[in-house]
Image (cartoon, rainbow, N blue to C red):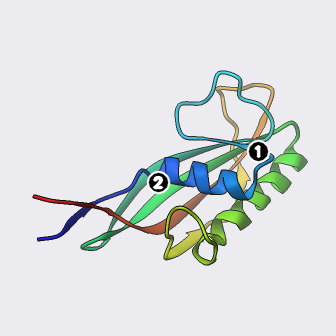
């Protein structure tokens, strides 16, 4: 019997989006201690099994900038890159990617940066396991 477990979507997106948008830093939790403008934090917030060997993975993506206007522009850029993943050559095969539009999302952990966030769902293959 073939079974699969979900991939580490936070790490996969960190690597794949980082290769597309190489001027920015991408992180899986926890937040880096030196968080700054141009940083992106990706966190899995749930998901579901899509098939016996693939998963719908829900993530939230937070983008940080020095001003609200910069945060909107930056978040839109990351949003567009994420939405394009199914048609790109990346280390992970994304069969689908859908996302809500970014919104202002104050982060109490940092008083000096503006954050925009959006939620996305990606369908990815699982990692095969043997039982």
User: Which structural element holds mark 2?
Assistant: helix
Local crowd size for mark 2, using a 10 Å CA cut-off: few (<14), some (14–19), many (≥20): many
Q: Residue at x 76, y 45 (%)?
A: 24
* Coordinates of residue 76 in the picture (x, y in percent): 78, 60
Q: Residue at x 47, y 59 (%)?
A: 58
- Quadrant into which the N terminus falls: bottom left
The earlier-in-sequence mark between 1 and 2 is 2
Q: Which residue is the site of mark 1? A: 24
Q: Residue at x 38, y 55 (%)?
A: 7
* Coordinates of residue 98 in the picture (x, y in percent): 57, 71
Residue 128 circle label? none
Q: Residue at x 71, y 23 (%)?
A: 34
* Coordinates of residue 100 in the picture (x, y in percent): 62, 66
Determine the CA span between mark 1 and mark 2. 18 Å
Local crowd size for mark 1, using a 10 Å CA cut-off: few (<14), some (14–19), many (≥20): some
* Coordinates of residue 27 in the picture (x, y in percent): 60, 40
Residue nearer the viewer, 128 or 109: 128
Q: Quick check: 52 above or below 126?
A: below
Q: Which residue is the site of mark 2? A: 9
Q: Quick check: 22 above or below 100?
A: above
- Quadrant into which the C terminus falls: bottom left
User: Which structural element holds mark 1?
Assistant: loop
In the displayed structure image, the side of residue 125 where residue 104 appears, left or right: right
In the displayed structure image, the side of residue 65 where residue 53 appears, left or right: left
Residue nearer the viewer, 75 or 82: 82
């Amino acid at each position: 019997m073939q079974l699969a477990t979900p991939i580490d979507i936070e790490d996969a997106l960190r690597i794949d989006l980082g290769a597309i948008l190489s001027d920015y830093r991408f992180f899986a939790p926890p937040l880096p201690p030196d968080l700054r403008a141009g940083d992106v934090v990706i966190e899995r917030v749930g998901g579901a099994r899509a098939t016996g060997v693939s998963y719908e993975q829900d993530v939230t993506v937070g983008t940080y900038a020095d001003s609200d206007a910069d945060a909107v522009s930056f978040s839109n850029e990351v949003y567009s890159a994420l939405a394009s993943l199914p048609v790109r050559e990346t280390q992970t095969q994304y069969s689908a990617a859908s996302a809500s539009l970014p919104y202002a999302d104050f982060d109490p952990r940092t008083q000096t940066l503006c954050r925009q966030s959006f939620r996305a769902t990606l369908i990815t293959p699982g990692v095969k396991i043997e039982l």
